[in-house]
Amino acid sequence: MVQEQTPTNTDINVPKKWQVAVIPKEPTYFDRFLPSTHQQSTLFECGMDMGDEHALPYPKIHVLAIRQPWASLVIHGLKNIDIRSKNTSIRGTIAIYASRAPIRKKDLKWVNENCDVPADLFDDLPTGMIIGTANLIECMEYESDFHFKLDQRRHMNREDNYCENIKGWLLRSPRAIEPVDYKFNGEVVWSLADTEILQQTA
């Protein structure tokens, strides 16, 4: 009767070094025009189907319209929650557009009196321009006026602006660019722009 031999360590030939070929990933069109510090949006999040990036000079990025002085406060990192009446499914890097809506003196007065902001911040408040980018990472609903008030330092809204089902859009990693003239062609809140604009943030 022949017994099967159990292989020992000496019977197994294990190479001392593994030969592993590392092939760097080719960046997509979208990756090339976004700051490396930003969380990258996918093409789907920018309203495009896979493969469409090769059919356009530049892929698109969502543009969020925010009234001044709130837009500048977001870009300077002083305001990181934007108050809205609805949720959004959009996530990732977005462009911040300072809307053409007239700047209200009562807003400037309230911010100066209730928020800790640099004195010279309001010397230059561009309107009708894309002024930077930020990462939209989450949407949340305020359960009560108490919770709304707790976040006042972050959203910079009056307490009487609270209403049932009000939402907060959480923004991170703001980055300023040289303001770019932009014709807002979307709805009241969102539009789409070529990411060519964001080359200035590199």
Image (cartoon, grey):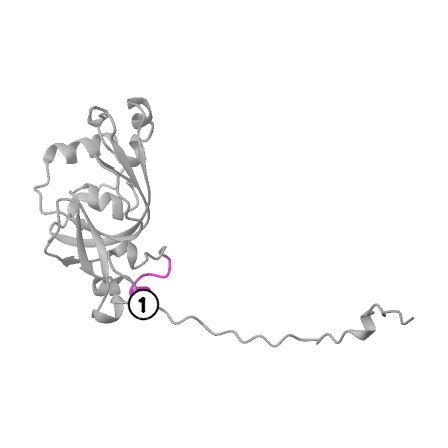
Q: Quadrant of residue 86?
A: top left
Marks counted in the figure total: 1
* Residue 110: % across, % down: 18, 31
| Residue with the most extreme right position | 1
Q: Does 28 sit left or right of 96 as displayed?
A: right
Badge 1 marks a residue whose secondary structure is helix
Q: Quadrant of the C terminus?
A: bottom left
Mark yes or no: residue 175 visible.
Answer: no
* Residue 40: % across, % down: 35, 57
* Residue 4: % across, % down: 85, 69
* Residue 155: % across, % down: 27, 35
Q: At x 23% / y 31%, what residue is drawn?
A: 157
Q: Quadrant of the N terminus?
A: bottom right
Q: Does 123 sit left or right of 173 as displayed?
A: left
Q: Tag 1: residue type? A: Arg
Q: Does 31 sit left or right of 10 as displayed?
A: left
For the record, the magenta segment spans: 28-37
Q: At x 31% / y 67%, what residue is drawn?
A: 32
From this view, report whether residue 146 is shown above or below residue 95: above
Q: Of 60 and 131, which appears nearest the observer? A: 60
Q: Of 169 and 25, which appears nearest the observer? A: 25
Q: Mark 1 = which residue?
A: 32
Dominant SS of magenta comes to loop
